[in-house]
Amino acid sequence: MHSPSRAVCRPHCWQAPALRQLQRDGLVERHVVAATPVQVEYRLIPEGHDLEPVLDAIIAWSHTWIPLPGPGPES
């Protein structure tokens, strides 16, 4: 199992709604860091780490079945 400190994410504005949803779903925990400006960090909790094999399987599947985009049209 990974240590929680290795899975720290400092979100950008566009990531915040997804991270809040993951928190509601019980996969990450939110930590407010007393700094100027205030910082917010998200860490995977054990339930989130348990999804790692599932995500690895989805990634492997995508490498088999989803083609990478080819080079664009030449100008």
Image (cartoon, rainbow, N blue to C red):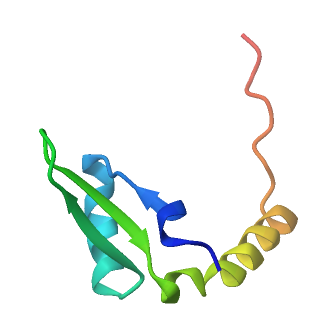
Q: Quadrant of residue 40?
A: bottom left
| Vertical arrangement, residue 17 with respect to residue 37, above or below | below
Of residue 6 and residue 15, the one placed in the foreground of this image is: 6
Residue 49 position in % (x across, y down): 57, 80
Q: Nearer the viewer, residue 55 or 63?
A: 55
Which residue does the image show at 60% across and 87% down from the upper left?
A: 50
Q: Quadrant of residue 65?
A: bottom right
Q: Quadrant of residue 75?
A: top right
Q: Quadrant of the N terminus?
A: bottom right
Please provide percent x and percent y for residue 3: 56, 72
Residue 24 position within the rendered picture, expressed as x and y whole percent measured from the top left: 27, 84
- Residue located at (76% from left, 78% from top): 57
Whether 70 is drawn above or below 48: the answer is above
The image shows residue 35 at horizontal and vertical percentages of: 15, 45
Residue found 30% across the figure and 76% down from its top = 21
**Residue plotted at (74% across, 68% down):** 59
Q: Is residue 59 left or right of residue 5?
A: right
User: Left of 20 or right of it: where is 42?
Assistant: right
What count of labels does the image hold?
0
For residue 27, above or below residue 20: below
List the single residue furthest toward the right.
64
> 15 or 5: which is nearer to us?
5
Relative to 26, say whether 60 is above or below. Answer: above
**3 left or right, relative to 35:** right
